[in-house]
Amino acid sequence: MATGQAAKLEFEAEVIRVDPVMGDAVLSTFVAPEGAVVASRPGQFVQILSRDPGSTDPLLRRPYSIYRVDPVASTMTVLVRPYGRGSAWLCRQPVGTQLDVMGPLGRPFEVRPKSQNLLMVAGGVGAAPLLMLAEDAVREGRQVTYLMGAQDETQLLPASELPEEVEYLVATVDGSRGHAGFVTDLVPEYLGWADQVFSCGPEPMFRSLREVVHRHRLGDRPDVQMAVERPMACGIGACLGCVVETRHGMKTACVDGPAFDMDEMLWG
Amino acid sequence: MGMTMTPDVTIDLAPNNPRELVLRNPVIPASGCFGYGQEFAGAIAVQRLGAFVSKGITPRPRNGNPMLRITETPSGMLNAIGLQNPGISAFIRKYPPMWESWDVPAIVNISAESVEDYEMMARRLDDVAGVAAIEVNISCPNINAGGFCFGWDADMSAQVTRAVRRATTLPMIVKLSPGALDIVEIAQAVEEAGADAVSLINTLVGMDIDIRRGEPVLANVTGGLSGPAVRPVALRMVYQVAGAVSIPVIGMGGIAGVEDAIRFFMAGASAIQVGTAAFARPNLLMELVDGIPAWLAEHGHGQLADIVGTANPRFLARREATPVADRGITERDFAR
């Protein structure tokens, strides 16, 4: 009986590495139970309690896409930018901190078995779930082009983070590295090549990507999956705080997503 | 009372109702915070709870409010979900059959915008297997009274309660709104009208403003405030109501640990509901299930009833003065 299961989602996790990345962000790596590590898929997330023990503030957990898992070391890594009170707290936690983590949660990206060429379109910390997806795809022998956009070069994911088989192209708004402009400007020339497109980033980037894909509509254009971000309370589909309007009604970002088909979502 | 025995924390929340509502412990996830139960099945042992309350069900399906629906506040959160639910008919087909095999009472929370619709839903639920009780949310606008909230008016609250009582013999909990001018008057009115128990408090209406956009944060503008931030208000209202009614009081509002729960018991609550804090920590529910009896044992109490209302002179005076049959207290009280 499902109601008889013991607590499996919530676990204590010791931080074992904190690496600065992308300006003021960090890659925080913590030890996780083997079951949680091997169950994690690209696009899924963990909810991390982001406050001092005994405090009730900030009240809610913060969701982070899984950036990388290491089944051998039994660790998970998340990419955290100090954007609000919770993420700033997490960025400050040094090696040795015991975190309270729930996960993996949510529906991952879906790579079709026959897809050979995968295009990834990342904006800012949206780089995280696509990094894990790219690593998996390369391991499975697929071709990956990873496009990343940021405000300036300090905000870019270092190329050394990606497998060397990945073609990595960048765009910066201030032109300090790569294409001067938006990452979605780089998308058109790959649309004929890609079997599938995966994206994660801010809402304006999603809208621009959708416009580019629709404008360059080909006979057999690739499907596009987007991992959306929403404020969340429970992370397990109970509160209905993080809904996404779709052609098939209200869906939760935490259980039915975060990965959604672009054309499944209603864009308002 | 033996110090080595596990304290008795069982409770009947409908002692005057032959269909009774006996819980193995006083820990109940609150409506809107526990989905339909199965969402939490991977996170906690649901069958160890005293009971659980479903999301609010309405006469017809509701899509709920547009985004944003939730936002965090100091030690709390605002929500304006807008009662997203499949409606009573689809609800009855889908969830109670699943609950029938669960060894934990399922309480169905109902919301409506007219007395007739409350009555209709209560009638539909009366003989549905898998439904242990109804919790009536009266914090809704009455469309026949210009949208004035049922729960802010004693007469309208009593009308809803009487209508539900006519329609079903199921144990009925009426969930009180803290927006009422005098919550004690509302509690007494619904007791008089046939409620088996009251639960309080529902959320307090609040809002936040995004100063960058210069607009309210929530699409609905206002939302319900919950979490530890509301606890002192909730505790005060539970204290007042428990001192003024004879039916069981279920306390809720910001409970985030065992000691918070004990405060509500001492104020006069027979059971507690937990909502917002379990969003962040589902396992809090299990900590309460284990921690309440542990606290009682540690403090030399053989049963939960030993501490109920002990900080509330009016509650104690009423219990002293009320005839045994009307008390809302089980026989265990007299076995001591």
Image (cartoon, rainbow, N blue to C red):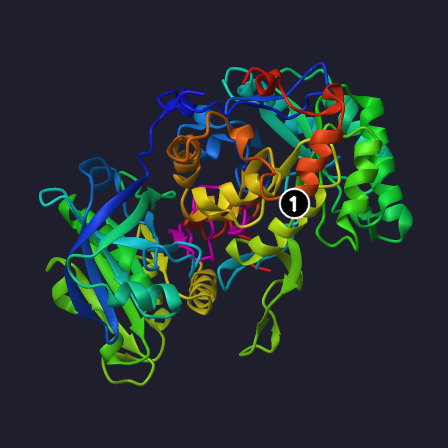
Check disc 1 and give the amino acid type: Val
Residue A236 percent coordinates (x, y): 44, 42
Residue sitting at x 74%, y 19%: B325
Nearer to me, A181 or B138: B138
Question: Closer to the camera, B175 or A154?
Answer: B175
Q: Quadrant of residue B284?
A: top left
- Say if the magenta span includes residue A237: yes
- Residue at 10% from the left image edge and 60% from the top image edge: A164
Please report, as a chain letter, where disc 1 is located. B
- Dominant secondary structure of the magenta stretch? loop
Locate residue A229 relative to residue B92 in the image: left or right: left
- Quarter of the image with the C terminus of chain B in it: top right
Across the whole image, how many numbered discs are drawn on residues? 1
Q: Which residue is mark 1?
A: B238
Examine the structure image and report whether residue B160 is included in the region drawn in magenta.
no
Give the left or right position of residue A21, taking residue B98 as reference: left
Query: As displayed, is residue A65 above or below residue A205?
Result: above
Q: Position of residue A184 (x, y in %)?
A: 37, 69
What residue is shown at x 24% (from left), y 62% (from top)? Answer: A146
The answer to whether A37 appears left or right of B120 in the picture is left
Instruction: Using the image, determine if residue A235 lies above or below residue A153.
Output: above
Identify whether A19 is placed above or below B149. Answer: below
Q: Position of residue A153 (x, y in %)?
A: 24, 79
Part of the protein shown in magenta: A218-245
Q: Quadrant of the N terminus of chain B?
A: top left
Q: Is residue B61 above or below residue A125?
A: above
Whether residue A160 is visible: yes
Give SS at disc 1: helix
Label 1 neighbourhood size at 10 Å, few (<14), some (14-19), many (20+)?
Answer: many
- The quadrant holding residue A17 is bottom left
Could one spot residue B70 in this view of the protein?
no
Closer to the camera in the image, B33 or A56? A56
